[in-house]
Amino acid sequence: MSLKFVSYMSYQSRIMSKKSIEDFLFQVREKNKSLTITGILLLIQGKFVQYIEGPAEEIDKVYTSISKDSRHTDMILLDSGDLKERQFENWSMAYKEVTDKQIKDIIGREELNLEDIFLGKTKSENHPVLEVLYNFVKTLSS
């Protein structure tokens, strides 16, 4: 089975309450378990930043479904590709609302502009969105 990942950023079409997000996450986690999809969803300044990984065919279907979901607008594909092994194999969908300070601590930039951070040129081995995600994961395990 070939593995694939996709990461994207989108704007919330409307501000979701914490309860709405919790209900949404429950549904997503159950669906992801059945499809063997893992990943992480961050909420940063009203924008979703998500990374999902799993069987290539399922990832393509889920990404297409997400792109049609009315909870998102102005969806931007940040990165995608093939994987040799999962990065977030134990999480059907981790979630975190990230503060500006946390992003600044990770990225090291005073001015926080997600489009520049995630779409700008980088000399890093990993895409900047993955740097944010991996650093977030490190905080969970420490």
Image (tube, rainbow, N blue to C red):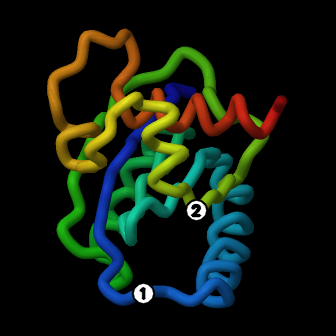
Query: Residue drawn at (50%, 26%), measured in percent from left and top?
Result: 2
Q: Mark 2: which amino acid?
A: Glu
Return the x and y of residue 26 as percentages of the image width and height.
72, 75
Q: Which mark is residue 97?
A: 2
Q: Is residue 4 visible?
A: no
Q: CA distance from mark 2 to mark 1?
A: 13 Å
Q: Return the mark for residue 87.
A: none
Q: Evaluate if marks 2 and 1 touch, with contact meaning CB atoms under 8 Å apart.
A: no
Disc 2 residue crowd, few under 14, some 14–19, many 20+, Cα 10 Å: few
Crowding around mark 1 (Cα neighbors within 10 Å: few <14, some 14 to 19, many 20+) is: few
Quadrant of the image occupied by residue 63: bottom left
Residue name at image x 54 percent, y 45 percent: 102
User: Which secondary structure lies at badge 2?
Assistant: strand
Residue 135 appears in the picture as rendered: yes
Q: Is residue 55 above or below residue 32?
A: above
Q: Position of residue 85 (x, y in %)?
A: 61, 19
Residue 78, quarter of picture: top left
Residue closest to the eye, 127 or 106: 106
At label 1, the amino acid type is Ile
